[in-house]
Image (cartoon, rainbow, N blue to C red):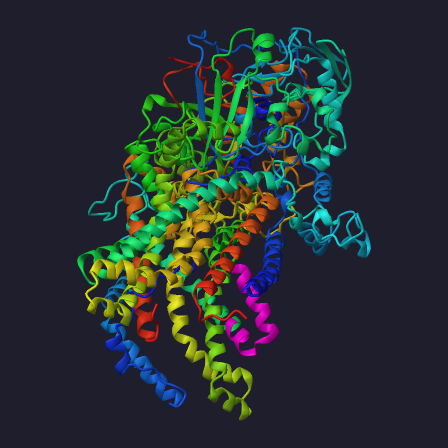
Amino acid sequence: MTRYIIRRLIGTIPTLFVVSLLIYSILLVAPGGPEERFAQNPKITAAAVEAFRKRWGLDQPIPVQYCRWVGMCNPDGQGLGVFISNSGVPNFLPGFLGGGDNGVLHGDFGYSSSSGATVISLIGARVLPTAILAGVSLVVWILLALGTGVLAAIRRYGKADTVITIVNYIGFSFPTFWLGLMLIIVFSEGLKWFPAGGMWDTRSVPIFGSDEYWAFLGAQPLTAIVDLGKHLILPVITLVFVNIAGDSRFVRAAMIDSLNQDFVRTARAKGVSERNVIFGHALRNALLPVVTNIALELPFLFAGAIATETIFSWPGMGLAYIQAVNNFDYPVLMGILVITAVVVVAANLLADILYAVVDPRISYG
Amino acid sequence: MDRSLPPEDPPDERAVTEDLEPGGPDYDVQLESLSQWQIAWKRFLRHRAALIGSVMFFGMVLIAIVGPFILQYDYYKIPVPDVHVNAGRPPSLAHLFGETGRLQWDVLTLVVNGVRYSLLIGVIASAMGAVIGTIVGGVAGYFGGWTDTILMRIVDALLALPLLFVILVFTKFLGSGNWISVTVIFGLFEWLGIARLVRAVMLSLREEDYVDAARAAGIRDRRIIFRHLIPNALSPIIVSTTLGVAGVIIGEAFISFLGFGVGFDTPTLGNILAGSLGFISQGNWWWAFFPGMAIVVIVLGINFMGDGLRDALDPRAKI
Amino acid sequence: MRKRLGTLVAVSALVFAACGGTTPTVAPSAVATAPATTPPSAAPTPVPSQAPIPIDITATKYKAEAVGNRGGHLVVGISGDPDTVWNGIYSTFANDQEAFGMALWGLWSNTNDLKYYGQLASDVPTVTNKEVVLTGDKMDVTINMIPGANWSDGQPINCDDVIFMWKWQLDPAQGDAGNVQGTTGYQDISSIDGAGTSTCVLHFSKVYEPFLGLFSPLLPAHYLKTATVSDAIKKLYIDTGLKTAVWSGPYMPTAWAHDAQINYVPNTQFWTTIKKSAAPFDQVTMKFYADTDAEIAGFVNGEIDAGLEFNQNQVAAMGSVPPASIDKTPSVTYEQHSWNYASLTKKFGAAGAKAMMEALHYAYDKDAINTTITGGVVTPTCNFTNAQAWFNDPTVTCYKHDADKAASVLAAAGFTKDSKGILALNGTEANFLGCARADRQYRLDTLNLVASQLLPLGIKLTVKAAPPANVFAGWSIAADTPCNLTHGNFDVAEFAWVATPDPGSLYTLYDSKFDPSLGDHSGQNYIRANSPDLDTLLLSTQTTVDLPTIKDALSKIQVLYADPANGFPEIPLYDWTTVMDKSLKLHNVANNGSATDQLWNIEDWWRDQ
């Protein structure tokens, strides 16, 4: 088992390598590069743009730029020495082994070309909000998918099944942003039940993630959580409604499948209560494919959360991404893509391992 | 993008197992596939949701094709507002879906033309994806080895990225608001699922005897792929491509909403919606409602139809 | 602080600045165009002269009402996170100015009625008060800093800061760092006297009229010295180091949660040494929304006291905002149609082109454009000046929409309708290409509306949407790029200019030398205006030092521009409207249409209990 996990871990390296190449190639297709934001400013001379390019290393050949960005190459090195860190060992090694300190491999994503702040500090503050939105949505999503899926399965072809099926399909057909905006107009601007955007109440709650916030959370946990909940409701509804259909139908299919199995028939024949049959036997059996499927959908959840953020002014990675695109801020843009890709690859790995652990038919020798 | 629903219904065993056992290698290839298509067609016709879906989808296709010719107003003829109303005017006999704000375009005309472009974008991009995916998956699955490893790593890597966001960068920097380039960009990212599917089919079929026989008989690789392997992979490709159309239409709508999509000179359901948003709070619901409904009808129809197709084309599919 | 001065004194500029890459437009164009930002595309400012003035450029009508209530937490909303604190230095994004204009002041600034006032300087240097002295072609400017004024860390604000910033701005390393203010103006200063005192004398080696735009904001020398010039953007005023940074304005930022909010507290040094009163608010927060729709919903929902940075394009979405809360004021930004005079001349010859332009002026129905496109919230205009600019001549009258007159002008010039019903002169049809960026629906709609107004006359206008990058790209883009302004691949194009009270900027817009096909292609005379009379007048504004003379020349230029008989190829449509949603409990809010900074007088704001 351990060997299987290690093998799978090593297997992700080439994938991540290709991911980094692809992300970097975005810089190649994008016209202009980071200096594009000066393009319409006649006060910026060509010489100044050249100086700017040099400062950001954009005057180097593309492979060298890529190599530095990833952290394989030492920006101070010359010739073949670029691969060697200042302490004389290969540059890609971690800092404590004497490797370099630059590049993605060393957690250095560079500086935002529009604000000058480090990319890691910009993204760092965004991870938790996105994780909260995605996490809460995931929980709601799983619970609802299980509930509606099971209900639809045991009332197969009944009214509940029909209603759930129709709602699922309609949800699946809704453009996310459209639903989100309608919710804002109705529940925020119209009924004033929920805030129009943001993650916390500006007047009564400190900035999320700040020391003051944690102190506030400790002092008035209920207020803080209710506030967060109020801000979460609309984005979570949006995210869940348009995405739940897949899993709800999946659970339904798995349950129907499971209810048709011999052991369930046997249990019924033995006189086990219907309730027990459904929740004790059939559901447990149906859960395995469902759980692994959800693990595989994590990346999609993240992407969805990111899209939802742009509607509900949720201060997560999605908003940061949109802003980076608008500002031609390539370092930030690439940093966010790298981080989401790593999360996705990790989620896939987890799903594989989970599956291998629970399914004896998969050999992992 | 590559969202897909699981089958409408797990196949009902009693119906499936008896008469629909798929053909094995001992059948004549052509005969077998013929009967398979006929069976699939029958089964599709029996699939109620699939039929409803087809009616919805092809109804919209029909509207997109003939609509512009029978409409009272020509999209390319600029409206000359008789009364200048910034918020537009509600549905009336002259304008069944009402008029937009500002220039007072006929919403029905806009929607019909929007359906046309949205479907074009969706169908072309998905078809592009199907072609690229089939080629990549076929090549990877057939040749195996390094070719396979490299191609599949690229697929894995692309699947690890939030594709809508990559597309967003491309449309922002290269799309230039032109519907053709936006379509091509979507098409360039639509092939991943199909490549995987085709590769999987290739891998399983490579081992079949008749391929070895064909190869032994000196038939060239390319011919083997196209004569024997592709037809076998066709069912999942059709299903995936159909569902892909819906994904692209919704994706384009999102990109347009963010202002990176197709320019306002070419009506798509996405940018009509995007243009309407500011006017809702003035009471102009019709400008936003009808294109929104058109998206729902198209996507719903495609999903129903796609599910029906999957059930019909792949009797073995359990989940 | 770059705010008004930046916009006003520097130059006029394309408003696409607002959208061309610096504005995080999350929503589509129809609902989210940032209002006139400070122009990144500030053209090099030519050098008119300061004159002995009977014209008082400081006579503002703005007067703050006494603070009636102190305390409380002011929350203002805006769409889009700022880029950087370095507003005006490394960035020219409107939201940066709103967010940090209140924290870092300049020496001078503009009121909401386009007049000048001192911020960290106690008065505005003019020739009249003898603080501007002209000696031949040289100029000395005396700056009286507010005596006893301190930075937020208690260090004095004095000439040392002016001197240091002058040298800092001229440091060659600024180019690498992407300094957008440039060296214009600073490079004309030969020396500065007054080190260590609060009276500095700038010695200019030549007359530099827009000097009031320099040192905006003024930065603290002792803080700048803690980092090298090239490291400044990475080490100073960074988002995580706001508490240790040094400020001069009334409220200073303490924490910045990106895309969420910035918190400010009163700068006690400002309130004790500059304003000499207590701060009206204990706390200020700027809350960021992803788009203007959410910002409007947030205002309706009571999340913010004021929603900033709206323009006429968002008013339609304010259906649930109480009308009294929608504060609208005319902007100095004006929407206009640039007609390509070179293209017209090529089609119809000089006389035909002039007649066509004259007819076009009459043919436009600007009132219909206002009601249809903007819902009647803008001010139709026929001139490039803002009514409040000191040089504006209010006696220049506007022509009226008159389709019959247009038809007769064209008929008199020999235009006749051909078999297709299109006007033609010597076989060339009046068949025009109208361009606008593809992501601005209201511009495409406006062009289409104009097309419908022109068609009955027999003028055919085909509207084309083009990628913004293609429209505004410089000379280096392919010469046949459709709709490109620089190469003149259009008959008419719609975009907006930011008007300016500084007549010098007109030089690069309308002087025939600045036809972008000529010279170094950096001119902005996209319309290819080519009138010797105009050139002479424009030149006279560059060479005289006498403000009345400049005003006289401008008056003639206004006539040249606005009288259809002169066939000037630019047709202004309307002045934009700067909009703010404000709580009726707020006092002293003075919506500023002159530029982007609606918080320009935030030190006077207060709120009822």
A174 shown above or below C329: below
Q: Position of residue A150 (x, y in %)?
A: 27, 58
Q: Nearer the viewer, residue A305 or C171?
A: A305
For the C terminus of chain B, the quadrant is bottom left
Percent position of residue A135, x then y: 43, 46
Q: Residue furthest bottom?
A: B217
* Residue C578 covered by magenta stretch: no
Furthest-front residue in view? Answer: A270
Q: Main secondary structure of the magenta part?
A: helix
What residue is shown at x 51% (from left), y 8% (from top)?
A: C278
Q: Quadrant of residue A117?
A: top right
Residue A261 visible in this rendered orientation of the protein: no
Please identify the quadrant where the N terminus of chain B is shown.
bottom left
* Residue C508 visible in this rendered orientation of the protein: yes
Q: Position of residue C61 (x, y in %)?
A: 48, 11
Q: Is residue B109 above or below residue C247?
A: below
From the viewer's side, name the closer residue of B51 and B103.
Answer: B51
Q: Residue at x 50, y 49 (%)?
A: C426
**Residue C407, position as x, y percentages in the image:** 40, 39
Q: Nearer the viewer, residue A296 or A35?
A: A296
Q: Nearer the viewer, residue C174 or A364?
A: A364
Above or below: residue C14 compared with residue A82: above
Tally the numbered discs. 0
- Looking at the image, residue A92 sits to the left or right of residue A115; the answer is right
In the picture shown, does residue C243 fall above or below B85?
A: above
* Chain part drawn in magenta: B137-159
